[in-house]
Image: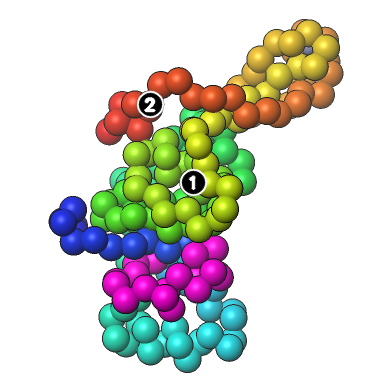
Amino acid sequence: MVSRTESRFALDATAFYQGFHLRSSITCITTGLVFAEISHIQSNLSILDSLISNRRIMIFQPTDSTLRTVRLVVKQIGETQLSDADISIVALAKECNATLVTDDFAVCNLAKTLSIDLLNLGTKGIRERRKWVKFCKSCGRGYPPTQTICSLCGNKLRVRYKKLIDSKIAQNQE
Ligand SMILES: [Zn+2]
């Protein structure tokens, strides 16, 4: 779709809230879902409109097959904090080989798993890819993210992040 040499930045909602589209002179791409999420900021509407007419912001829709790939990885890492808009912008960044600009931890985690270039606006950043795991506090047994109750002792499961060792999850999906 877009060549790797053409450097582009894919912005999620948090990137717009931080004003990244205002301080960069390069092309920003985003999805319709993200744009719908941010366009309620009335004071910025005229600026957004002019950036769109100058083609400084371009809105694309990722293909269904990329969305499917991304959703599969979301399920695999058990990330529950992601909206459809989040998933759409990660898919678009993947598809366009764009640098994903975000301030959202869950989006960063997903992008890292998919080997997407990241520009994290937050101060904390993300040092390693992690995965949600469910576990029982009483017996210590681990469970997939969809499970809520321990099947051995019936206790409510806790959630924690676990470091991912395999760095090639995304590639194996394709
Ligand atoms: Zn248990």
Residue at x 32%, y 76% (from the top left corner): 25
Amino acid at dot 1: Cys
Residue at x-position 47% and y-position 91%: 46
Locate residue 4 relative to residue 154 in the image: left or right: left
The color scheme shown is: rainbow
The residue at which mark 1 appears reads as: 108
- Tag count: 2
* Magenta span contains residue 17: yes
Q: Residue furthest front?
A: 123
Q: Determine whether, in the image, residue 12 is placed left or right of residue 116.
A: right
Indicate the position of residue 100 as horizontal and vertical percent values.
39, 55
Q: Position of residue 52 (x, y in %)?
A: 35, 82
The mark nearer the N terminus, 1 or 2, is: 1
Q: Which quadrant of the view contains residue 101?
A: bottom left
Q: In the displayed structure, would residue 29 be above or below residue 117?
A: below
Where's residue 168, x and y in %? Answer: 34, 26
Q: Is residue 105 above or below residue 42?
A: above
Helix, strand or loop for disc 1: helix
Residue beneath disc 2: 167
Which of the two residues, 149 or 159, is positioned nearer the viewer here?
159
User: How much space separates mark 1 and mark 2, taking CA atoms?
Assistant: 15 Å
Query: Measuring 53% from the left and 78% from the top, which residue is drawn there?
Result: 39
- What amino acid does circle 2 point to? Ser
Q: What span is in magenta?
A: 13-30
Q: Tell me if mark 1 has few (under 14), some (14-19) or many (20+) residues whose alpha carbon lies within 10 angstroms of its own.
A: many
Q: Is residue 106 magenta?
A: no
- 47 vs 101: above or below: below
| One can see residue 13 in this view | no
* Location of residue 55 by image quarter: bottom left
